[in-house]
Image (cartoon, rainbow, N blue to C red):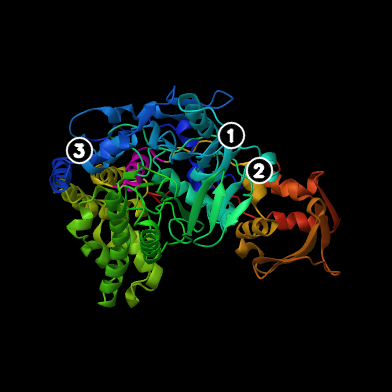
Amino acid sequence: MLGISRLQSVCAVLTIACCIDVSVAAPNPATEATRKANQAIADYLPFSKTQDFDDARHGFIADVPNPIIKGSAGNTVIDLSQYDFLKQSGPAPASVNPSLWRQSQLLGIRGLFKVVDGIYQVRNIDLANMTFIRGKTGWVVIDPLTSTETAKAAVDLINSKVENLPVTAVIFTHSHVDHFAGIRAIVDEKDARAGKVPVIAPEGFMEEAVSENVFAGNVMSRRASYMYGNLLPKDPEGNVGGGLGLTTAAGTITLFEPTKIIDKTGEKLTVDGIDVVFQMAPGTEAPAEMLFYFPQFKAICLAEDANHTLHNILTLRGAKVRSAQKWASTLDQTIDLWGSDAVVSFGSHHWPQWGNDRVVEHLEKQRDLYKYINDQTLRMANQGLTMNEIAEQFVLPDSLAKEFYNRGYYGDLKHNVRATYQLYLGFWNANPADFNPLPPVEEAKRYVEMVGADKMIATAKAAYAKGDYRWAATVANKVVFAQPRNQAARNIEADALEQLGYQAESGPARNFYLSGAQELRGGVKKMATPNTSSPDIIRGMTTDMFLDFLAIHLNGPKVGDKSYVYNLKFPDIKAQYVLKVKNGVMNYSKDKQLDKVDGTVTLNRSALDDIALGKLKLGNLTDSGDVTIEGDKAKFKEMLGNFDKFDFWFTIAEP
């Protein structure tokens, strides 16, 4: 089956945790070297400061009635009680970086909070926050979470504890799924289309919301299963949260097209009696993003451009590299626009800032964090240092590094430095010897042949004993890629990755290390491929986008010397295309038909949706009643046989 079961990689891993078998070898305790590394962080950062905990609890009204939020079928959408271990008092467990532990404890503070009179947030019942502005007649909602179930829980909570009002408008800050997918729980699309409930979004929202993870969706999704730690148990030796939020809801993903698009900075709207001024922020944290200001409340909505963490310049799941320079410039503009007036700022994640001085200081230091990463990476690159050399030497000044909101709980500093280098110069370091490297397995085999597996394992064990876990993992990994069944090499690499995970300040980095260790010890547990496709997301794909996605599945080497030409007709959308396969690639032309073709294929666009949702198999098109073929049916079926199916459960920590 050809399917788009992983359109949004964040959502692709949501159902894994419900079925994954984590019965692998018991984790090791933290070593003395890890204890010392974590103690160094504890000694460096100002843990005596409690302002963040005061702010995270400020204005608390009520928690959700039940920490286990379920769907209509009785399925568990999110189980917040899994993270109750974070409530324990005292120092961080030895197996968790104390800075990450602190962040996770803050993210465990959940429920409904008053920001100021007229502004409320439901925080930490999903990955993102859901914000409510008291309008003239109802609630203006900002970012309705990842699923309809959690969005409904948030609305029910504020209606029961503050005021029972209808939703009168929705604003999407940006195009990531944890900020829009609960929309149908709070707004009827008919009311939006009729103009009763405006749905407001930044320019490019719909295209980006649908397309970001389509073309590389399978690989992004598999990597996301590591990044979000869905394969790990929730405990001090496993998943302790993601830094940006604890975890993501596994519920119903919905979407429909916004009714109002914002396309310029300074644009003003009055939404249910509330004035809003917008600032465009494309190409920062998301390709389509905007910040905005409420003059009535003197409040800035920061979207996801200023947080209580260093964010990702390049997310670990994989995506297009973001610009730290553009990010910094956007925050600088925010200060210029509203810094003199704002008395509160709040974001799509984490907790607010109160008081003009604190609002501006937070914006300035977040701005300077991204500016420093951009400028200093380029400074060192211009001195001839390579990507990894820059990352190894890169140190933030204490004025930035000692601010907890600048720590790398979600984005990792070294990873972001490498990403910035990549943005400007690419992944190659310009060393001719590295221009055409051997692939990992071949390179590993030659290292093992040269040194010997036993000696390399001994070297890795010696490095581990010294606390040199990076080198231990590097050496053992060479043996694993040369000899995947060498359990001694797998075990020592897993042990080293585990300690690196225990030391990691970034939640996603920790999850990557520990997920790799788990699979090295127990192998990849191939469960049923998670199918979290959303009909709304599928319908949101243009036909061109679907055909581009289909072209990625074409096995070019198999069809390099073959040629197929078909007219395509989609009666339900009154569209027609010419599809050509030649020279190993698939091209198409819209609004065109040819006389000399192998055949004409007529099918509804809805049939493509069924293929994406797994209801109809691509290879069965010729045998189904969903398609009419005039011409060479056998050749069309032959062509369909050259499209690959992607395996979700490919290996990562081994070849």
Measured Cα–Cα span from mark 1 to mark 2: 13 Å
Q: Nearer the viewer, mark 2 or mark 3?
A: 2
Q: Position of residue 409 (x, y in %)?
A: 31, 47
- For disc 1, the marked residue is 185
**Residue depicted at x 37% and y 32%:** 110
Residue shown at 53%/62% (left/top)? Answer: 264
Q: Nearer the viewer, mark 1 or mark 2?
A: 2
Mark 2, other Cα within 10 Å: few <14 / some 14–19 / many ≥20: many
Closest to the observer: 348 or 529? 348
Q: Which of marks 1 and 2 is nearer the N terminus?
A: 1
Q: Mark 3 points at which residue?
A: 30
Q: How far apart are marks 2 and 3 (CA)?
A: 54 Å
Residue 599 higher or lower than 5, as above or below: below
Q: Give the range drawn in magenta.
A: 506-523
Label the magenta part by its dominant secondary structure. Answer: helix
Q: How packed is label 3: few (under 14 Cα within 10 Å), some, or many (20 or more)? A: many
Image position, residue 301 (x, y; %): 43, 49
Work out whether residue 7 can be spotted: no
Badge 1 density bin: few <14, some 14–19, many ≥20, Cα 10 Å = some
User: Is residue 459 covered in magenta?
Assistant: no
Image quadrant holding the N terminus, namely top right
Judge left or right: residue 142 versus residue 416: right
Q: Which sits earlier in the primary sequence, circle 1 or circle 3?
A: 3
Residue type, label 2 = Ala
Q: Where is residue 368 in the image (x, y as percent from the top left)?
A: 29, 61
Q: Circle 2 sits on which residue?
A: 192
